[in-house]
Image: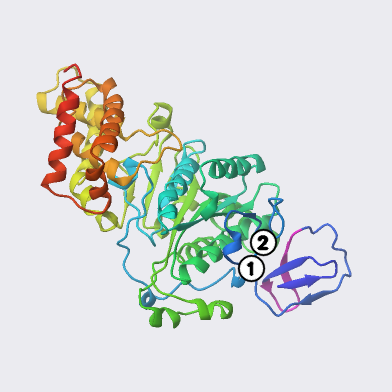
Amino acid sequence: MLSFENGCKGMVLNLEEHMVGAVVLGNATAIKEGDTVTRTKRVAAIQVGEGLLGRVIDTLGDAIDGHGPILGERFEMPLERNAPGVIYRQPVDTPLQTGFKAIDAMIPIGKGQRELIIGDRQSGKTSIAIDTILNQRKLFEQGKPVYCIYVAIGQKASSIANVVETLTRYGAMDYTTIVAAPSAASAPMQSFAPFAGAAIGEFFRDTGRDALVIYDDLSKQAIAYREISLLLRRSPGREAFPGDIFFLHARLLERAARIIGNDDIARSMNDIPDSLKIKVKGGGSLTALPIIETQMEDVSAYIPTNVISITDGQIFLEMNLFNAGIKPAINVGISVSRIGGAAQIKAIKKVAGSLKLDQAQFSELETFAKFSSDLEATTKRAIDRGRKNQALLKQDLHAPMPIEEQVAILYIAMNGYLDKIHLNQVKIFEKQFLELLSTQYHTALTSIAEGQWNNQIIQVLIEVAKSLLTKYPQS
């Protein structure tokens, strides 16, 4: 880090024989030729602590929400830090529930995973991220919080304000920090905002707690980084991006990890900041949900392919599905989680085991069915069930569903109990079925939430469904 005469901070990025190439963090207009620049003998860092929860900060860690200074003890966390070595990690096997049936059943996310959300603009990428934060409210109330960090890069200030308003309205700001680098911010501020988010997440991770960081979105960070690199005269490559753009995203996303549960081993972890050494505990995790915006659904462009190859799976959102009213607009065929069933509770693994394959086959069959009028009975049945499952997987905005309710309704659908009712009755049935369960058979839902899955629970679900189905006209 450098310090300019007028108090501005700068960061050295190029060190050459007769010249130092640096970027200015903050307002560069007051810097004049001939000003004295001094080195601070410190690396770029951010002050992190519990006081950041519920606040909106900039890349340098300063509050920008008008609620006064950040209070409480603060620890200096470097923006750039080596990811934990493989010895200090443990396998990803604990689910991080998003509250979306389509994701928790088919593309499960585990604590410590990196799952990419990719799609064109206005296809619902941010909504998935925001609703995942809202879904952590229940855990916060139970005293087992997942601390969330939402990094907004290159967005309109009004869009960031809307996110803050939504999170405040649903009580999610209690466990959330927002790092804002709006489109009006300088390229360095936008480029280093995700690193600030990662540093905050690492504070929670290394003190033995769970954290979730959302980078919205890394394509705008790449553009800001390209701007800096071209100004520093670094040679451009494909799509005019510099050669180290892959490394930029790789070293950022590699910091997501699930730390080993042994405190003694965790304390010997590489690259722990001095300020944090006394507080280190094992068993924490940092989950990353990077967002990438595609142009005309081109996943083969440079930045999308880079980030796909770094992450542990992707959720691909398609505009055609979104426009057809299927929300979240997930293309089941090319969305994948490379952690898979390891990050699911037993009940949903049993219930929704074949759902992803069924829905992928259904989308193929539906395309084929458009050209053919006389279909055989099994194909007709597969298409009909696929349509009903698709209707069931639709979810309203800001309405994440608890995992036990997801298991209950998916069991009924997957075992053919909805085959006889009309397609337009599916959502009505779901609402009534879940209301009936939560009011009269609450113990069954509680048992599923606690991880149980047995014949007794299955019997209750079947009885409730059968009694309700008698009131529906059969197709």
Viewer-proximal residue, 305 or 82?
82
Residue 464: quadrant of the picture: top left
Residue 262 image point, x, y percent: 36, 78
Residue 374 image point, x, y percent: 14, 18
Residue 317 image point, x, y percent: 41, 40
Residue 236 in view in this figure: no
Residue 451 in view in this figure: yes
What's under tag 1, amino acid-wise?
Gln
Q: Is residue 65 left or right of residue 256?
A: right
Residue 376: quadrant of the picture: top left
Residue drawn 68% across and 50% down? Answer: 65
Q: Is residue 33 above or below residue 379?
A: below
Q: Is residue 22 above or below residue 59?
A: below
Q: Secondary structure at mark 2?
A: loop
Figure quadrant of the N terminus: bottom right
Q: CA distance from mark 1 to mark 2?
A: 10 Å
Disc 1 crowd rating (10 Å Cα; few below 14, some 14-19, many 20+) is some
Q: Which mark is residue 219?
A: none
Viewer-proximal residue, 152 or 12?
152
Q: Is residue 59 left or right of residue 27?
A: left
Q: Which residues are magenta?
A: 14-26
What's under tag 2, amino acid-wise?
Ile
Disc 2 crowd rating (10 Å Cα; few below 14, some 14-19, many 20+) is some
Q: Where is mark 1, residue-wise? A: 47
Q: Where is mark 2, residue-wise? A: 70
